[in-house]
Amino acid sequence: MFDKFGPDFIDPSMIVENLPMAGASEIKKAIEQKEQQRQQAAQMQEEDRQRNAALQDAVTDQNVALAQERRARVLSDIGLARERVSRSVENRQDAVLSRAKAMAELEQMDTDRLKALIDLVGQFEEMFSQKEETAIATDIAREQQLAGPQGQSAQQQQETFNQGAQNV
């Protein structure tokens, strides 16, 4: 009959209660303890499953939040790129307008006045170039004071930059 119904069909404690043997109460206690341990293990497994499910939900939520943050950053970068392109177009238009105005003024000037103006512009460029070189030298000196032994590489980088700028 046990084979027909299986071990889950008949509770072992019922069998022990109905057996007329000595020590049945001890067997019953052992069976109850074993059943209690099995229930505790099942409960712990269920709690572990719930914790794992909650952890998976938290990881999923975190991944969704990161994806949304990245998407927002991409949209922001696209907006900034559009703004830069727009600003670049405006700058080019302003440069064309400035050139047209300068050409109109040049057409109205006589040659002597034009030569004087070109000399003046050259002097301004030279003055600005000297100020820029002085500022760069000052920055390099400050950097060397702050960087210590690493100052050599910064100076070399600046010299390379200056040579590249002169070649342009």
Image (cartoon, rainbow, N blue to C red):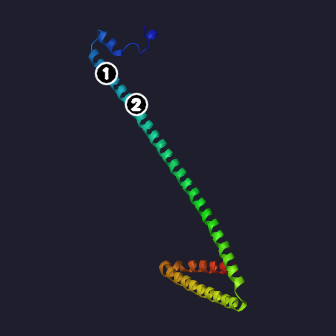
Mark 1, secondary structure of its residue: helix
The structure residue drawn at horizontal position 30% and vertical position 9%, both measured from the top left corner, is: 18
- Mark 1 residue type: Glu
User: Quadrant where the N terminus lies?
Assistant: top left
Query: 25 above or below 62?
Result: above
Name the mark on residue 124: none
Alpha-carbon span between mark 2 and mark 1:
21 Å
Name the mark on residue 46: 2
**How crowded is the residue under tag 1: few (<14 C-alpha within 10 Å), some, or many (20+)?**
some
Q: Nearer the viewer, residue 117 or 61?
A: 117
Circles 2 and 1, Cβ within 8 Å, touching? The answer is no
Where in the figure is residue 124, as x and y percent of width and height?
Answer: 61, 87
Q: Is residue 23 visible?
A: no
Between discs 2 and 1, the one toward the N terminus? 1
Where in the figure is residue 72, as x and y percent of width and height?
Answer: 53, 52
| Residue linked to disc 1 | 32
The structure residue drawn at horizontal position 62% and vertical position 62%, both measured from the top left corner, is: 85
Q: Quadrant of residue 35?
A: top left
Query: 143 above or below 77?
Result: below
Where in the figure is residue 164, as x and y percent of width and height?
Answer: 67, 78
**How crowded is the residue under tag 2: few (<14 C-alpha within 10 Å), some, or many (20+)?**
few
Mark 2, secondary structure of its residue: helix
Q: Nearer the viewer, residue 31 or 143?
A: 143
The structure residue drawn at horizontal position 70% and vertical position 84%, both measured from the top left corner, is: 108
Q: Seen in the image, is 23 located left or right of residue 96?
A: left
Q: Seen in the image, is 119 located left or right of residue 32?
A: right
Q: Seen in the image, is 146 located left or right of residue 44?
A: right
Where in the figure is residue 84, as x and y percent of width and height?
Answer: 60, 63
Q: Quadrant of residue 12?
A: top left
Q: Nearer the viewer, mark 2 or mark 1?
A: 2
